[in-house]
Amino acid sequence: MIFITLGSQKFQFNRLLKTVNELVERGIIKEEVFAQIGYSDYKPTNYNYKQFLDRDEFAAMEGKADIVITHGGTGAIIGAVKKGKKVIAVARRAKYGEHVDDHQLQIIKQFENQNLICGITDVNELEKAVDYVYKHTFDNYKSNTSVIIENIRNFIQENIYD
């Protein structure tokens, strides 16, 4: 199954939803697709969707998915890769009214450079991206939270006892 999540910020991402709808219609995407469409006003006709999911619904849908297609938000990407999902991240672009700037391009590039996701900058690349993620082996996500905590702990200890 493919799960699409577009986050909860008040921006539409119609261009991604339309592209997936077309790929399902053409038979390129054969898997079941479900989308959490957020503030998008485009209503897919070839797959199921809901505007927003509660926490349990979201976890259930993401859990069933083999592939997660998401916007370039850090939380959405990390949440999916932590669960071992194959992720296609598509940058929201300011020029289409999808965000205030193009910072998601940089976020996606960082995750892609670590071999954690497949990042695309244009929805026209989605067909190739779906094929790619099925064949590609991504690295496992490793949190650096413990390293950050240890660095803070060391800093405090060094400065308190000096």
Image (cartoon, helix red, strand yellow):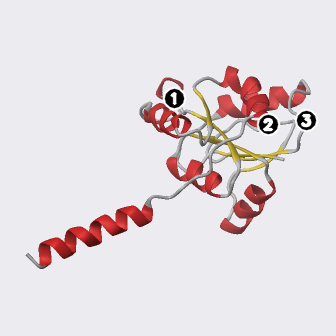
Q: Nearer the viewer, mark 3 or mark 1?
A: 3
Q: Badge 2: how crowded within 10 Å, few (<14), some, or many (20+)?
A: few
Question: Relative to the observer, which residue lies in front, 157 or 122?
Answer: 157
**Picture layout, residue 15 above or below residue 37:** above
**How far apart are the alpha carbons under marks 3 and 1?**
27 Å
Residue at image mark 3? 30
Instruction: Say which residue appears at 71% left-offset and 50% top-offset.
Output: 85
- The disc, 3 or 1, on the residue closer to the chain's N-terminal end is 3
Q: Residue furthest bottom?
A: 161
Q: Is residue 74 left or right of residue 123?
A: left
Element assignment for label 3: loop
- Amino acid of disc 3: Lys
Question: Relative to the observer, which residue lies in front, 70 or 108?
Answer: 108
Percent of width and height locating residue 77: 58, 48
Q: Is residue 31 left or right of residue 70?
A: right
Residue at image mark 1? 93
- Amino acid of disc 2: Tyr
Percent of width and height locating residue 87: 67, 42
Question: Relative to the observer, which residue lies in front, 3 or 12?
Answer: 3
- The disc, 3 or 2, on the residue closer to the chain's N-terminal end is 3
Name the quadrant containing residue 146. bottom left
Q: Nearer the viewer, mark 1 or mark 2?
A: 2
